[in-house]
Image (tube, rainbow, N blue to C red):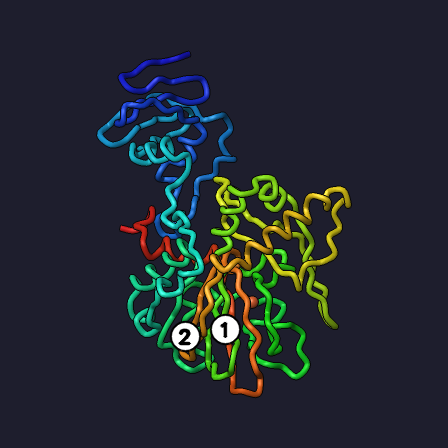
Amino acid sequence: MDTLTSAVTLREKGLDITLPDGRTSYFNYYWLRDNCPTSFDSETRERTFDIFHLEQPPRPQSVALEGEALVIAWQRENHVSHLPIPMLQTFADEGRRHDPAALPRAPWYGDHFPAIQRFSQPMLLSDPQKVAAWIRAMLVEGIAIITDMPDSDEGLTETARLIGQVRPTYFGQYFDVRTHIEPTNLAYTAKALELHTDTPAEEVAPGVQFLHCRANTVEGGDSLFLDGVAVAEDLRREDPEAFRLLSEIDIPFYCEHDTYDMRSRQRVIELDETGAVSGVTISQHMADVFDLPQKLLDDYYPAFCRFGRMLQEERYVMHFRMRAGECLTFDNHRVVHGRAAYSASSGERYLRGCYTDRAEMRSSYRALVSEGRFKA
Ligand SMILES: [Fe+2]
């Protein structure tokens, strides 16, 4: 039974509506009933309508266009839905809710250091719009520098809390990068630290890393940072088959000592739902024995090594010296980092670090920049 109104055609399981842009879009009756604005509680902001309790599939009794709303009176229910046309337009256009945090990534290269966006910590504490700008830099470029940090443990915590909760790893809530007497990790020595992303042996490695430089008077110890997205996108162009292997095949990572034996499988190149590179996972010191079919390794190893060599090319790597009072913040799934060796007896080098997560950072950004569905 198809019923024609001026702009709406009722079908068996849904309706076609001609929206203001002139295009006709189809909407399912369950979807229209479930997403009636009354389904959402304005106080808790949660969905309170229970689609499961409907005894019959939802069907319209009558449909009308009234101003900016599609008005549906439902059969067998004493209920009328007023669905805003702009909401229908959004889902017809994008197929999903608009996400202000879904910003395109901008690749960067070895000359990027002077252009890294910098934010003063006291300014961030006092101005939410500065926090939004900082997170925007993190979403687009994956890296930012916080300046004027207090020389205290609390300074790092209060900075991280602007983005999200401090996210522990099996090393604890925080980590101290300086020379340890009995190191469990290459970072805790004065040796060179090869280019890596942190804790790939975790099922989900932490998303955002904070490195607060408290002291750096040693000879050497320059920081090395590069954009994994830039390198991986170049690999896609230069060697599509290597890119395919690295973005489709999981390899094992591990981190093992007296009281822990962490293991995971990760893809070296991470793609988002659109197929764009959203990150990389790389760590030679935490790569486990590759337990892939040996014939597959005939192809995988050359691809892995080609990418590993690209990561070290000078065109990608920023070299700089961290200064006391600065805190580097970066996407741990995107920004590959390392350190040159230093002379432990030449001075003091102390970085205190912690993590938060990517999803929470995006949540904070949306809350800062968006009107949302429920704000007055
Ligand atoms: Fe690291």
Pointer 1 residue? 222
Q: Give ligand 1's quarter of the image.
A: bottom right
Q: Where does the image place residue 179, in percent across and percent down from the top left?
A: 60, 81
Q: Residue at x 36, y 40 (%)?
A: 38
Q: Amino acid at mark 2?
A: Glu
For discs 1 and 2, the disc positioned in front in the rendered view: 1
Q: Quadrant of residue 198?
A: bottom right
Q: Horizontally, is 286 left or right of 3 in the view?
A: right
Mark 1 and 2 residues: CB-CB less than 8 Å, in contact? no
Q: Residue at x 44, y 57 (%)?
A: 109
Residue 326, relative to residue 36: is it above or below?
Answer: below
Checking the image for residue 78, the label placed there is none
Q: Horizontally, is 243 left or right of 223 in the view?
A: right
Secondary structure under tag 1 reads: loop
Question: How much space separates mark 1 and mark 2, taking CA atoms?
Answer: 14 Å
The quadrant of the image that shows the N terminus is top left
Q: Nearer the viewer, residue 207 or 277?
A: 277
Residue 369, relative to residue 255: is it above or below?
Answer: above
